[in-house]
């Protein structure tokens, strides 16, 4: 066997070991972090969700950001606070947490909103307030412009609404590339993501520290699974085109919209929120001082008050 053949064989064996190891790691992560809610089979997609509070109360639907899952909202306290006077439904969006993400669909914000409309109708949720954080804000907006599903209003937190130059977004999109992306997702991407995750968490919570409850309770190992890394990469690739597409809707949106953004957000600048407030016919802007991207942790009480102001209007 030549030197080249030996190197190629060793590389192939290493790739196989990485794939097997990452598949095993994913199974272990799911076993150690079982579902905390129920499952719904909707339009061929298995969705994981929680349903809390009084079923007869006004409903609030929570949509998490890219790479996250239901636990983001439970750990922040938003679910418990909202459930005191509302029915609270929170989904793992397709591909995240314990929800599936069929590969034959392009999961744009509009596609996710269309699926969620069917899911909400299936479980009897009508006229909700929709709260979206980060990438989930785009899905919330997509729900808001659905013509066949009325909502009470929107609460948008740390969202990205207007296209800008974002090299970081394109760099994070690698695992979404067909075939090559799968190879990356099942080999080196989980290792790289594990290495950068602590710094990424510090960045999204900055200038505040990462809460100890988040460190203790958030199932970070689920974030590192190949299928969730691929879903996150797809959403990174879709971020700028989606914001560009949605601009035309802002001036004609009739819903009451409450906008929250941290003034020290290092992921998405607060000017995005300011510009959206100016573009919308009916909105209130809440810039939270000394808060970063995880504004839901910085002032959950204010967000709950904003939700209740819509449900009670």
Image (tube, helix red, strand yellow):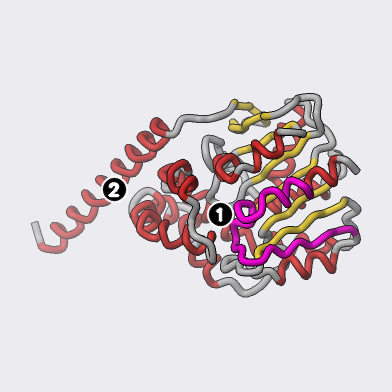
Image coordinates for residue 252, horizontal then vertical, percent: 90, 58
Residue at x 75%, y 26% (from the top left corner): 54
Please give the residue where the numbered disc 1 appears in the rendered image: 234
Residue at x 80%, y 29% (from the top left corner): 57
Nearer to the camera, 59 or 304: 304
Is residue 225 visible to the viewer in this orientation of the structure?
A: no
In magenta, the rendered stretch is: 282-306
Q: Residue furthest bottom?
A: 165
Residue 149 vs residue 87: left or right?
Answer: right
Q: Secondary structure at mark 1?
A: helix
Q: Secondary structure at mark 2?
A: helix
User: Does residue 81 lie above or below 158 as drawn?
Assistant: above
Residue at x 83%, y 50% (from the top left corner): 145
Give the quadrant of the C terminus: top right
Image coordinates for residue 207, horizontal then vertical, percent: 54, 66
User: Does residue 289 lie above or below 80 as drawn?
Assistant: below
Image coordinates for residue 205, horizontal then vertical, percent: 53, 59
Residue 291 vs residue 227: left or right?
Answer: right
- The Cα–Cα distance between marks 2 and 1, rounded to whole angstroms, is 22 Å
**Label 2 with label 1: CB-CB less than 8 Å:** no
Please give the residue where the numbered disc 2 appears in the rendered image: 18
Marking on residue 57: none
Residue at x 83%, y 63% (from the top left corner): 248
Q: Residues within 10 Å of mark 2 (few under 14, many from 20)?
A: some
Residue 92 position by quadrant: top right
Image coordinates for residue 224, horizontal then vertical, percent: 42, 48
Residue 128 position by quadrant: top right
Give the quadrant of the N terminus: bottom left
């Amino acid at each position: 066997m030549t030197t080249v053949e030996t190197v190629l064989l060793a590389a192939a064996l290493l790739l196989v070991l990485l794939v097997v190891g990452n598949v095993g790691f994913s199974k272990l992560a799911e076993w150690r972090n079982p579902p905390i809610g129920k499952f719904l089979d909707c339009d061929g997609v298995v969705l994981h969700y929680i349903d809390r509070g009084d079923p007869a109360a006004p409903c609030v639907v929570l949509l998490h950001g890219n790479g996250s899952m239901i636990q983001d909202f439970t750990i922040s306290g938003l679910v418990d606070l909202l459930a005191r006077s509302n029915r609270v439904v929170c989904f793992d969006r397709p591909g995240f947490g314990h929800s599936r993400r069929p590969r034959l669909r392009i999961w744009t914000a509009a596609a996710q909103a269309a699926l969620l409309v069917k899911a909400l109708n299936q479980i009897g949720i009508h006229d909700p307030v929709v709260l979206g954080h980060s990438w989930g804000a785009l899905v919330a907006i997509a729900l808001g412009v659905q013509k066949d599903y009325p909502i009470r209003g929107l609460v948008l937190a740390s969202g990205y609404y207007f296209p800008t130059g974002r090299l970081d977004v394109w760099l994070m999109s690698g695992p979404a590339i067909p075939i090559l992306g799968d190879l990356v997702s099942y080999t080196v991407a989980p290792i790289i993501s594990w290495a950068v995750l602590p710094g990424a968490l510090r960045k999204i919570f900055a200038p505040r520290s990462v809460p100890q409850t988040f460190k203790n309770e958030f199932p970070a190992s689920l974030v590192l699974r190949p299928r969730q890394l691929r879903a996150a990469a797809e959403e990174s690739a879709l971020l700028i085109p989606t914001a560009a597409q949605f601009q035309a809707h802002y001036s004609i949106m009739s819903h009451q919209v409450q906008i929250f953004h941290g003034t020290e957000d290092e992921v998405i600048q607060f000017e995005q929120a300011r510009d959206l407030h100016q573009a919308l016919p009916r909105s209130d802007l809440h810039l939270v001082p000394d808060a970063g991207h995880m504004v839901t942790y910085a002032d959950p009480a204010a967000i709950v008050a904003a939700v209740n102001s819509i449900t009670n209007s």
